Amino acid sequence: MKVPPFEHYTGLLKSTGLVISGIIIGSALFLSLYHHHLNTVIIKNRELQAENEQLLTDLNDFKKTRNQQSTINQIDIVVEPGDLNPLDKVTMQELEKRVRNELSVIKGQKIATFAETPHVYQRLLSKKTYHNILDKDYVVNIKTMLLIHTELKVWVTAEVFKKPVM
Protein backbone atom coordinates (compact mmCIF):
# COMPACT_ATOMS: atom_id res chain seq x y z
CA MET A 1 0.00 0.00 0.00
CA LYS A 2 1.30 3.38 -1.00
CA VAL A 3 1.24 6.45 1.32
CA PRO A 4 -0.05 9.56 -0.45
CA PRO A 5 2.43 12.44 -0.66
CA PHE A 6 2.25 14.96 2.17
CA GLU A 7 2.72 17.93 -0.14
CA HIS A 8 -0.89 17.67 -1.33
CA TYR A 9 -2.25 18.43 2.18
CA THR A 10 -0.06 21.38 3.31
CA GLY A 11 -2.61 24.03 2.29
CA LEU A 12 -5.40 22.14 4.05
CA LEU A 13 -3.25 21.77 7.17
CA LYS A 14 -2.42 25.50 7.21
CA SER A 15 -6.05 26.54 6.81
CA THR A 16 -7.16 24.08 9.53
CA GLY A 17 -4.55 25.49 11.91
CA LEU A 18 -5.65 29.04 11.09
CA VAL A 19 -9.30 28.18 11.76
CA ILE A 20 -8.48 26.51 15.09
CA SER A 21 -6.32 29.45 16.24
CA GLY A 22 -9.13 31.84 15.22
CA ILE A 23 -11.59 29.84 17.31
CA ILE A 24 -9.28 29.96 20.34
CA ILE A 25 -8.63 33.71 20.04
CA GLY A 26 -12.32 34.44 19.45
CA SER A 27 -13.39 32.43 22.47
CA ALA A 28 -10.79 34.21 24.64
CA LEU A 29 -12.11 37.61 23.52
CA PHE A 30 -15.69 36.52 24.14
CA LEU A 31 -14.82 35.29 27.63
CA SER A 32 -13.05 38.53 28.53
CA LEU A 33 -16.04 40.61 27.38
CA TYR A 34 -18.44 38.32 29.23
CA HIS A 35 -16.37 38.57 32.42
CA HIS A 36 -16.25 42.37 32.21
CA HIS A 37 -20.03 42.57 31.71
CA LEU A 38 -20.68 40.12 34.56
CA ASN A 39 -18.42 42.13 36.87
CA THR A 40 -20.30 45.37 36.14
CA VAL A 41 -23.64 43.63 36.71
CA ILE A 42 -22.47 42.24 40.07
CA ILE A 43 -21.24 45.67 41.22
CA LYS A 44 -24.51 47.32 40.14
CA ASN A 45 -26.48 44.58 41.94
CA ARG A 46 -24.57 45.21 45.18
CA GLU A 47 -25.16 48.95 44.85
CA LEU A 48 -28.89 48.44 44.35
CA GLN A 49 -29.11 46.00 47.26
CA ALA A 50 -27.35 48.45 49.57
CA GLU A 51 -29.58 51.29 48.41
CA ASN A 52 -32.70 49.16 48.88
CA GLU A 53 -31.62 48.17 52.39
CA GLN A 54 -30.94 51.79 53.31
CA LEU A 55 -34.29 52.94 51.92
CA LEU A 56 -36.14 50.25 53.87
CA THR A 57 -34.45 51.18 57.14
CA ASP A 58 -35.06 54.89 56.48
CA LEU A 59 -38.73 54.17 55.77
CA ASN A 60 -39.11 52.16 58.98
CA ASP A 61 -37.38 54.86 61.02
CA PHE A 62 -39.47 57.56 59.38
CA LYS A 63 -42.67 55.68 60.21
CA LYS A 64 -41.58 55.48 63.85
CA THR A 65 -40.61 59.13 64.17
CA ARG A 66 -42.75 60.92 61.60
CA ASN A 67 -44.57 63.08 64.15
CA GLN A 68 -41.47 63.99 66.13
CA GLN A 69 -39.82 67.08 64.67
CA SER A 70 -37.11 67.50 67.28
CA THR A 71 -35.38 64.12 66.82
CA ILE A 72 -32.75 62.88 64.41
CA ASN A 73 -34.61 60.85 61.80
CA GLN A 74 -32.01 60.23 59.12
CA ILE A 75 -28.26 59.68 58.96
CA ASP A 76 -26.36 60.14 55.71
CA ILE A 77 -22.77 58.95 55.45
CA VAL A 78 -20.28 60.13 52.81
CA VAL A 79 -17.07 58.10 52.59
CA GLU A 80 -14.03 59.75 51.03
CA PRO A 81 -10.64 58.16 50.41
CA GLY A 82 -8.09 59.53 52.83
CA ASP A 83 -4.84 58.64 51.14
CA LEU A 84 -3.73 58.53 47.53
CA ASN A 85 -5.31 55.11 46.94
CA PRO A 86 -8.88 55.45 45.69
CA LEU A 87 -11.52 53.14 47.15
CA ASP A 88 -13.72 51.00 44.95
CA LYS A 89 -17.50 51.24 45.17
CA VAL A 90 -17.99 47.97 47.01
CA THR A 91 -15.52 48.99 49.73
CA MET A 92 -17.11 52.42 50.08
CA GLN A 93 -20.57 50.87 50.42
CA GLU A 94 -19.42 48.41 53.05
CA LEU A 95 -17.67 51.16 55.03
CA GLU A 96 -20.78 53.34 54.75
CA LYS A 97 -22.94 50.47 56.00
CA ARG A 98 -20.67 49.79 58.99
CA VAL A 99 -20.41 53.48 59.94
CA ARG A 100 -24.19 53.81 59.68
CA ASN A 101 -24.56 50.82 62.03
CA GLU A 102 -22.16 52.47 64.49
CA LEU A 103 -24.13 55.73 64.39
CA SER A 104 -27.55 54.05 64.55
CA VAL A 105 -27.65 54.82 68.29
CA ILE A 106 -28.11 58.48 67.37
CA LYS A 107 -31.32 57.86 65.41
CA GLY A 108 -34.36 58.85 67.39
CA GLN A 109 -32.42 60.96 69.89
CA LYS A 110 -33.38 64.55 70.50
CA ILE A 111 -31.51 67.16 68.55
CA ALA A 112 -30.77 69.12 71.72
CA THR A 113 -29.02 66.11 73.26
CA PHE A 114 -26.86 65.69 70.20
CA ALA A 115 -26.09 69.42 70.01
CA GLU A 116 -24.88 69.46 73.64
CA THR A 117 -22.32 66.67 73.20
CA PRO A 118 -21.24 66.24 69.55
CA HIS A 119 -17.66 65.43 70.59
CA VAL A 120 -18.86 62.17 72.15
CA TYR A 121 -20.17 60.99 68.80
CA GLN A 122 -17.03 62.17 67.04
CA ARG A 123 -14.92 60.10 69.42
CA LEU A 124 -17.12 57.11 68.62
CA LEU A 125 -15.60 56.95 65.15
CA SER A 126 -12.24 58.62 65.77
CA LYS A 127 -9.57 56.36 64.27
CA LYS A 128 -11.97 53.42 64.27
CA THR A 129 -10.63 50.33 62.49
CA TYR A 130 -12.95 48.15 60.43
CA HIS A 131 -11.57 44.70 59.75
CA ASN A 132 -11.96 42.30 56.83
CA ILE A 133 -13.49 44.47 54.11
CA LEU A 134 -12.50 42.66 50.93
CA ASP A 135 -9.55 41.17 52.83
CA LYS A 136 -8.25 44.57 53.99
CA ASP A 137 -8.55 46.63 57.15
CA TYR A 138 -9.54 50.30 57.04
CA VAL A 139 -9.17 53.18 59.50
CA VAL A 140 -12.04 55.69 59.51
CA ASN A 141 -11.90 59.27 60.83
CA ILE A 142 -14.74 61.75 61.02
CA LYS A 143 -14.10 64.78 58.89
CA THR A 144 -17.36 66.71 59.38
CA MET A 145 -20.69 66.23 61.16
CA LEU A 146 -23.55 68.46 60.06
CA LEU A 147 -27.04 68.52 61.54
CA ILE A 148 -29.73 69.99 59.27
CA HIS A 149 -33.30 69.89 60.63
CA THR A 150 -33.76 66.20 61.42
CA GLU A 151 -30.97 64.87 59.19
CA LEU A 152 -27.41 64.19 60.31
CA LYS A 153 -24.77 64.23 57.57
CA VAL A 154 -21.38 62.72 58.35
CA TRP A 155 -18.30 62.91 56.14
CA VAL A 156 -15.62 60.35 56.94
CA THR A 157 -12.22 59.61 55.47
CA ALA A 158 -11.07 56.02 55.07
CA GLU A 159 -7.51 54.78 54.72
CA VAL A 160 -6.04 51.34 54.43
CA PHE A 161 -4.80 50.25 57.87
CA LYS A 162 -1.04 49.90 57.98
CA LYS A 163 0.19 47.58 60.67
CA PRO A 164 3.02 49.03 62.75
CA VAL A 165 6.44 47.53 62.06
CA MET A 166 8.21 46.25 65.15
Image (cartoon, rainbow, N blue to C red):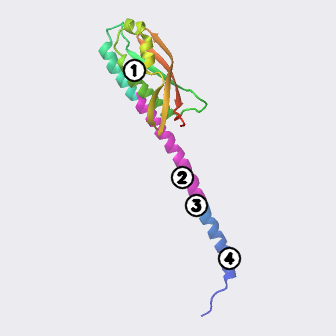
Query: With 108 as the anchor, is 156 left or right in this view?
Result: right
- How far apart are the two marked residues, 2 and 4, measured between alpha carbons? 32 Å
Residue 52: % across, % down = 39, 28
Residue 26: % across, % down = 59, 57
Q: Which mark is residue 31?
A: 2
Inspect the image, locate mark 4, and give the three-letter code of the amino acid beneath it. Thr
Circle 4 sits on which residue?
10
- How far apart are the two marked residues, 1 and 3, measured between alpha carbons? 53 Å
- How far apart are the two marked residues, 2 and 1, measured between alpha carbons? 43 Å
Circle 1 sits on which residue?
103
| N-term-proximal mark, 4 vs 1 | 4
Q: Is residue 50 magenta?
A: yes
Q: Main secondary structure of the magenta part?
A: helix
Q: Badge 2, how many Cα within 10 Å: few under 14, some, many 20+?
A: few
| N-term-proximal mark, 2 vs 4 | 4
Q: Badge 4, how many Cα within 10 Å: few under 14, some, many 20+?
A: few
Q: Badge 1, how many Cα within 10 Å: few under 14, some, many 20+?
A: some
- Residues in magenta, as a range: 25-51
| N-term-proximal mark, 2 vs 1 | 2
